[in-house]
Amino acid sequence: MKRLLLIFGLIILVSVLKSQVQCTYSLTFCTGNTYNDTTFIAGTSTGAGISYGCISSAYRSRFLISQAQNSGSVTIKATGSSNLDIISWGPYESTNELCTMPLNNILACSSTPSLTDSISFNITKGKYYIIGVTTNTMVTSSFTLSQSSGNGILCYNACSKSLPSSSICYVSPDTLMNQVVYINSVNSSFYKGAILYRQNVSSTYDSVAYIPNGQPDKFVDTITNANQQSYQYKIVYIDSCDNRNKISTTAHRSIFLQSSLGTGNQVNLSWVTYAGIAYTTQYIYRGTSLANMQLINTVSNSTTAYTDLNPPPGLNYYRIAIPTPTNCTNNALTGDTLIMSNYRTNQYVGINELEIQSSIIVSPNPAKDIVKINSVLIPTLITITDITGKSVSKVTPNSKEVTIPIENLSAGVYVINLSINNNSYFKKLVVQ
């Protein structure tokens, strides 16, 4: 009986020894890195050495711990200056379990009489793993270790270090005068996505969108109207460990153009300049439509006003532009070379846009079966879109008051877009 207890105690002692060695002397392993090691930890100096699964005699060992950043497969390859073997254990639920549990749950093991060995195993996101490299010789030796293939990503406490600083490429409106924010793409296996922030009336920032990795790196802000005001944005990156990178220190502010009639048929332009990138020149465009604009002058980056002394007769559109940055890494860019302002015309100055916006009344709101929309001028078109930007209703009014049936709409939040005098005005609608 005493002999059996002694054997049982030795087994426990060896298991504890293995656990203590794996944590006390362990390194951390990350996919994409190559590890060079010249200092094997001595498992024992005499006898047959410690055994690990298929490895019958490990005189010197090196342990590396890691955490799965996704679910997939990995192949780990080790090459040494003398014969070596390689083994992996896991999965473990926590770092505490990683260091206290005996090394029993072997995932893969390779012991061949060669200088190179490799193992392949599957990993589960969030779980912890141990990789062991051993040698059955007592002579000084070295090895290199890396992940040679597989779509799995292993890393331990290194996610945020692999991401660059959060940054926006630029902000420019689309044809509907929605501000479109282009963010810089991140080429990192640890990148999960980005959170976009917009400045509110209190000069603080609200989160307005999450842009996941794998999607086009842009966001169409359908709540905005470039013809009403300038908008300011910041961005923050999120890594695959759900750590948030530091919010971008540089805010990007859109160009906001205003106009008024001067002496005779002169048109006075004034604008809020773009902020967030460096540029030296601003371009002033004029045209008979938004699709037919010509450059009429260039001004310095500090200029904020311009008078068109001799505009052609009829309706004229105006816009301010600056060059797009050349160092953008955005995957959604379509070759645009200009960051544009909103547009202004030389007409419709009797009622300003703030008066039109404040005159729009949506009732009831929340609504269930019908919604009534009133405005000081007759809209040319009213469009209702859902939160994804999909149009769910379109109406061409013939009066300042319009009743729209909504009984077929699902409960949720919608956006009402009124087109008045070539401008867009937005109101939020809640359907019950």
Image (cartoon, helix red, strand yellow):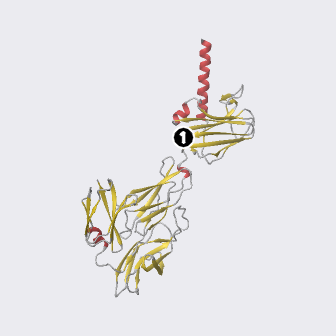
Label 1 sits on a secondary structure element that is: loop
Q: Residue furthest top?
A: 1
Q: Residues within 10 Å of mark 1 (few under 14, many from 20)?
A: some
- 296 over 389 or under it: above or below: below
Q: Position of residue 229 (x, y in %)?
A: 36, 68
Residue drawn at x 68%, y 35% as measured from the top left: 110
Residue drawn at x 40%, y 78% as measured from the top left: 317
Residue drawn at x 38%, y 76% as measured from the top left: 344
Left or right, 13 with reference to 240? right
Which of the 4 image quarters holds residue 378? bottom left
Q: Identify which amino acid the numbered label 1 is placed on.
A: Thr
Please tell me how many numbered marks the rendered image carries: 1
Residue drawn at x 62%, y 45% as measured from the top left: 150
Q: Quadrant of the N terminus?
A: top right
Give whichever of 228, 288 is nearer the camera: 288
Q: Which residue is mark 1?
A: 124
Left or right, 100 with reference to 380? right
Left or right, 111 with reference to 74? right
- 206 over 95 or under it: above or below: below
Give whichever of 158, 105 is nearer the camera: 105
Q: Position of residue 328 (x, y in %)?
A: 54, 64
Give whichever of 135, 261 is nearer the camera: 261
Which of the 4 image quarters holds residue 357? bottom left
Q: Position of residue 59 (x, y in %)?
A: 70, 31
- 206 over 52 or under it: above or below: below
Q: Position of residue 8 (x, y in %)?
A: 60, 19
Left or right, 327 with reference to 313? right
Which of the 4 image quarters holds residue 129? top right
